[in-house]
Amino acid sequence: MKLMQNKCIVKLFSSSIKNHQVDNRGLVLDGNLPFLRASPDSFIIDDCCGQGILECKCQFSAKDGPVTDVPYLHTTPDNELLLDESHPHYYQLQGPMHVCKMKYRMQI
């Protein structure tokens, strides 16, 4: 499953982000707080933004409609899709960012 998922990720990024690399590291322990752990789906490293966490979510709620139908996403006035900060997915992504010492995340 992970290998197939990574092939899809690489294909997606190959067409939209230049000079990138997708990397798997498995379980990551926080160096300062070893009881905190994270296992992000992947890491992405690119020339644009540096290193970040890549999380893959199945947007089943939008299978028959636009991604704007996903209940935990909202559209900003600039027409940007953002994760709702009150939804559990937000914390599911913030925790690994802290543990892995990453400054950004991508969700596909």
Image (cartoon, rainbow, N blue to C red):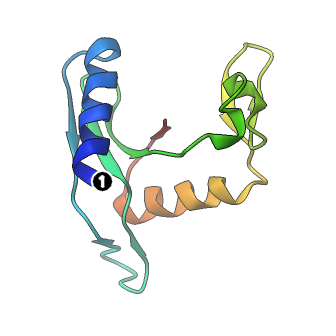
- Quarter of the image where one finds residue 18: top left
Compare residues 21 and 8 and report the one nearer the observer: 8
x 24%, y 23%: residue:
47
Mark 1 secondary-structure assignment: loop
Task: State whether residue 37 is above or below residue 54.
Answer: below
How crowded pointer 1 is (Cα within 10 Å; few <14, some 14-19, many 20+) is rated as: few
Look at 41% across and 86% down and name the residue there: 35
Query: Image point 40% across, 66% down: which residue?
Result: 99
Q: x and y percent of residue 40 in the render?
A: 38, 57
Among all residues in the image, which is located at the extreme bottom?
A: 35
Q: How many marks?
A: 1
How far from the left and from the top, in percent, is residue 92? 57, 60
Q: Residue 83's spot in the image, x, y percent?
A: 68, 40
Query: Which residue has dot 1 on it?
Result: 1
Q: Is residue 12 or residue 96 the one in the foreground? A: 12
Say what amino acid the circle numbered 1 marks: Met
User: Based on the displayed image, in which of its 4 quarters is residue 80 positioned?
Assistant: top right
**Residue 34: percent from the left, percent from the top?**
35, 84
Residue 31 or 1: which is nearer the viewer?
1
> Which residue is located at x 28 percent, y 53 percent?
2
